[in-house]
Every structure is written in structure tokens, then in C-alpha cells.
Amino acid sequence: MLETFLEIGIETDDIAGAFDELQSLGFSFINAGDIREYGYAVVSDGNICIALHESSLTGPWLSFVRPGLESYVRALRRQNIELEIARLGEQEFHEVGFHDPNEQLVTLVEARTFSPATGEDIAASVCGDFLEYSLATGSIEDSARFWHGLGFETIAEGTEPHPWRRIRGAGLAIGLHESARLRPGVTFTADQIDARVDFLRAKGHGVKTGAPIAPSERPSATLRLSIDLPIYLLEDQASAD
């Protein structure tokens, strides 16, 4: 089983620009250690951490902390999970990586690379409340079976606007969506979506109404960033009732 969700990682050659962009959405700076051998910065809304990497990985990817990683690798191999990243040398920061059935990269690290965010460090995010990391899949059953093997459990499912299932484990919710239109991204729920869209546009952000995971009758929006990580905004159903 995976231990603790750490971050959504994303590659960028402009950490400062991406950091400013996320900070303008209400994400707060998190002090990161110097374990990485390249540029690395982390922001958080208090629920989810996004890490900006000057690395050669293509993302976004999901990172989890797993103490005793070298031993856990044997359990992964018993599940026929093929490692595509394996840094387990005595002088290396232990890290492994593999892909799920949807080609979603997952990395596991031996220890945290930054301290957990605390409430006093975090400002309110313009995006609302984190709902899930949204991921397209050709087969919900195959994807769910893979993630269940890593300790995730189904917490919700539906059929509109396409079949979907939400799973949760290690402190992260993942939405599996049978939709070819969906790019992997982060989904939030919020009230007054139209007002938020107007505010974001006034701030110079590229945002359009509608999101590929939202039914047509549910107000929604898609926020495009300079990094390859769209943000999907859905009307909070409780506030809409």
C-alpha cells in the first residue's frame, strides 16, 4: 500500500513564472528542502501540493512517500508493476516510478521533500475546495483494479457526463473518467462559478466556461495555466441547491 500522498509534480523551465501564476490563484509557498539536484518549488492550498520541477520528467505525475521503499519494491513487482525509474543506490535519494494503465506516471520517494503545510501558512484559494485529481481512462474497471491494488477504495461513481468513478487512498482522491476529451488536471468545487470566472479573467488568466468532467447543467469552468496542468472548477452542488 502507498503511505502518504506528497505532491502533484509538474515539469517547467520557468519555476518563477509558474510560481507567480499559482500564487495569484491563492496558492501559498511551502519551504522545500534541498534534496533535489535541480530547481524545485512547492505551493499548496492547504489540501493539495503542486511541485514545480526543473527536471526531464514529463507530467503531471503523482508522488507518494513510502518509507522502506527498497523493501516495498518487492511488493510492487509481485503485482507485476514494472519500474521505469529506480534510484535505490546507497548514495542516492531513494525514488522509484511506474505508470498506471492510463500512462499516468506515479513516483514513490523514501521521505518527504518538504514539511507539511499548516493552516497559518495557507491563504484562501480562488479555486475553492479540492475535489480530485482527474484522469482519463479507457477502462474504469482496469484502472480501479490497479489502484485498488495500491490501497485505494471507491468512494463515489456516476454516469454523467460520462462513466466515472472516484477512488481515494493515501490522502488523495483520484477521479477516473471514461472521456477522450479530458487532460489530466486538478478539480475543485466552489460557489459562484460565474463570478470566479469574471475575477480570473480580470486577473489575466486564461479561463473558459465549461469543463469536460461536468454535466451540461452544472456550472463549470476550465483554467489553463502556463504549466501542463489544467484546473477544472465545478459549482458546489450544496451551494447550487
Image (spheres, rainbow, N blue to C red):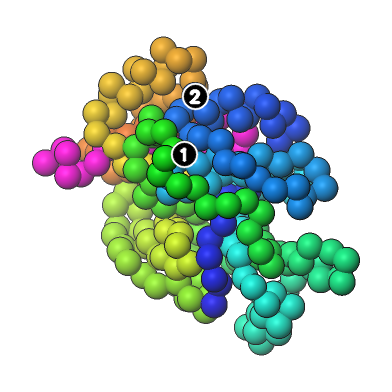
Q: Is mark 2 on a helix, strand or loop?
A: loop
Q: Please report contact status of discs 2 and 1: CB closer than 8 Å, yes or no.
A: no
- Tell me which amino acid carries mark 2: Ser
Image label count: 2
Q: Is residue 180 visible?
A: no
Mark nearer the N terminus (2 vs 1):
2
Q: What element carries label 1?
A: helix
Left or right: 136 as drawn, with respect to 155: right
Quadrant that contains the C terminus: top left
Q: Quadrant of residue 87?
A: bottom right
The image's mark for residue 24 is 2
Hey, which residue is sitting farthest bottom in the picture? 78
From what the image shows, is residue 237 above or below residue 85? above
Where is residue 103 drawn, in percent x and y?
A: 63, 59
In front of the other: 103 or 4: 4
The residue pinned by badge 1 equals 121
* Mark 1 residue crowding within 10 angstroms, few (<14) / some (14–19) / many (20+): few
From what the image shows, is residue 24 above or below residue 168? above
Where is residue 70 drawn, in percent x and y?
A: 74, 78
Task: Report the residue at 41% width, 33% height from top.
Answer: 123
In front of the other: 79 or 1: 1
Where is residue 193 drawn, in percent x and y?
A: 29, 29
The residue stretch that appears in magenta: 224-241
In front of the other: 191 or 79: 191
| Gap between marks 2 and 1 measured at Cα | 15 Å
- Residue 104 among magenta residues: no
Left or right: 14 as drawn, with respect to 223: right
Quadrant that contains the N terminus: bottom right
Task: Report the residue at 45% width, 68% height from top.
Answer: 169
* Mark 2 residue crowding within 10 angstroms, few (<14) / some (14–19) / many (20+): some
